[in-house]
Image: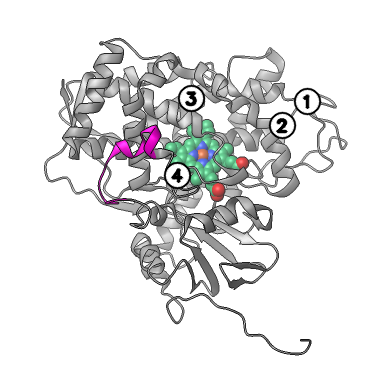
Amino acid sequence: MSGTYVSPRVPPGPAGTQSLRAMRDAPLEFVTAMAAHGDVTRHDADGEPVYMLNRPDLARYVLKENGANYTKDRTPDDDMLRPLLGNGLLTSNGAEWAAQRRRCAPAFRPAEVDRFDQVIVAAAEHLAAQWRGAASVRVDHDLTSLTLTVIVKAMLGTDIGGAGEGFGRAVDAVNRFIGHYVPSDDPDPADTAARYLGFQRARTFLDQVTHLIIAARRAGGAGDDLLSALLAEGHPRPETAPGAGPGTETDAPPGTCPVTGPGGMADVELRDQVLTIVMAGHETTAKSLTWTLYLLDRHPEAAAAVRAEIDEVLGGRAPAAADLPALRRCRQAVQEAMRLYPPVWLISRRSVAADVIDGYDIPAGSLVCVSPWVLHRDPRYWDDPAAYRPDRFDPEAAARHLSHQYLPFGGGPRICLGRHFALVEATLVLAVLLRDLRMELVPEFPVEPEALVTLRPRHGLMMVPRPR
Ligand code: HEM
C-alpha cells in the first residue's frame, strides 16, 4: 500500500553500541556471544550496523547464491589490505575481479600446483634438519619462514638470490603492521607510527624488487614458476590501469602494456597479483600447520594414526605429490585443525542493494559477516564440536557435511584460489616433519587463540622436537 510505513524487520542482537575495545580484546568470545542471539544478528560497531550470519545456508546465500550483491569494497579487510596489495585478486571487485580470476586460475590448477612438491619438500627437509637436536623451537615463526620461502620460490622462481632474504624481512615488517592493524583507538600511537614507517619502507622495497623481477623475467624468458604462468596469460590490457595501489601510474596508451606491447598482463597488475599471492599464500598455511602440530601433541591417538600412515606410505623416504592420495590422515589432521582454528576466522562483505536474509531486512551498504570460527563449532552441525577428530573428514563422513558448514577457504566464486596449494603444502610438510620428529609442547607453555588478521596462538608456540 503506497504511503504506508512498514517498519524494517531488524534481526536480534545486543542493545546499544558495542565497545570497540571489548570487540578487539576478545573477538572470538564476541562473535560466539552474538550467535547466541540468533541465526541472523545485528550489532552496532564503529557507528554502523553489522549483520552476522550464523547458519551454513545463510553463509552460502551471501558468498555464493546472491554473491553478486555482496562486495569486498570498503570492508575492514579491504581497508587493511588495499594500501599494500593495490587491486589484486583479494581486493578487486566486479568485472575487474572476474577477469583477474580467469587469468590467474590456470596457474592454480592441481596439476600445476603439484609441480611444486619438491620446492615444498626441500624446505620441509631443511626445517626438519634444523629442528633435529634443538632444545626447543618457535614453531609458529619457523613455519612462517618456511611457507614464505615456499611461496616466494613457487611464485618467483629460485633465482632471486640475495633479494630473497630482504624480501622475507620486508614481508615480515608488513605482516607486523597488518597483523596489529587497529583502524582507530590504538593503545599506543608511537608504536603504531614506528610500525607504519617500517610498513612504508617495506612496501617500497617490495615494490622495487617485484618490479625488478618482473622486468628481468620479461627480458629473460619464462621460468618454471607461477609468475611465468601469469606472464603467459596474454590478454588485452584494460582501458584504465587496474592497480589502485602504489605504482599504479603509467603513461602507456590504453590497451598497451608498457613492456609487452598490446598483450600480456600489465606490470601494475602483475605487481599487485604477485604481492597478493605472496601475502595470501603463506601466513594462513603456516597457521594451519602450527595448530595441527599443537593439536596432534594434545591427541596422542590421532598422532599415532598419522605416524603409522607416514611410516607405511614413506618408509623413511621423502614424499612427493604422487603420495598425496595415500597421505589421507595427514591431510585430515590439517583439515580438522582448520575446523577448530580456522586461520581466516571472519569473512566480511558489504551489500550493494538492499536484501532480505532469513526474513530480515539488510539495507544497501551494510556490513555482513560470516565467521568460520562460529560455524565450525556450532553443535547443531558438529557432534562434540570441541573434540579434535580428524576422521570427521573421512570421505563418507565429509559427504554428509552441509554446504558451507565447513568453510576455512571461504565459499562461492571467491573461494580461496590457493586452497589446493595450501593443502598440498601442509600435507607434505607435516609428513616430512612427523616422519623424523615427535613434537611436544614445552611443558606449561600457554596456548590460546588470538584473532588478528589470522587466528594465531597468542604467545606463539614453543615445542620440543624429539627424535622418533
Ligand atoms: C590454509 C591456508 C589458507 C587459508 C585458510 C586461506 C583462506 C582463504 C579465504 C577464507 C579466502 C576468501 C576470503 C573472502 O572470501 O573474503 C581466501 C582467498 C584467497 N586466497 Fe587463500 N587461504 C589459504 C592459502 C592460500 C594460498 C596458499 C594462496 C596462494 C598461493 C592463497 C591465495 C588466495 C587468493 C588469491 C584469494 C582471493 C581469491 C579471490 O577473491 O578470487 N590462499 N583464502
Q: Amino acid at mark 1?
A: Val
Q: Earlier in the sequence, mark 4 or mark 2?
A: 2
Considering only vertical position in the picture, is 181 above or below 216?
below
Q: Amino acid at mark 2?
A: Asp
For numbered disc 2, what is the local secondary structure? helix
Residue identifier under label 2: 267
Q: Are marks 2 and 1 in contact (CB under 8 Å)?
A: yes
Q: Earlier in the sequence, mark 2 or mark 3?
A: 3
Q: Which segment did they paint magenta?
A: 383-397
Considering only vertical position in the picture, is 29 above or below 220?
below
Residue identifier under label 1: 259
Q: Earlier in the sequence, mark 1 or mark 4?
A: 1
Q: Nearer the viewer, residue 254 or 421?
A: 421
Front tag of 2 and 3: 2
Task: Examine the rendering and report whether any part of residue 210 can be seen.
Answer: yes
Considering only vertical position in the picture, is 449 above or below 172?
below
Front tag of 1 and 4: 4
The residues tagged by marks 2 and 3 sit, at their Cα atoms, a distance apart of: 20 Å
For numbered disc 4, what is the local secondary structure? loop
The residues tagged by marks 4 and 2 sit, at their Cα atoms, a distance apart of: 31 Å
Q: Earlier in the sequence, mark 3 or mark 1?
A: 3
Q: Nearer the viewer, residue 259 or 269?
A: 269
Q: Amino acid at mark 4?
A: Pro
Give the image location of residue 411, x and y in percent: 54, 46
Q: Decide if ligand 1 comes within 8 Å of the CB at mark 4.
A: yes
Give the image location of residue 308, x and y in percent: 22, 21
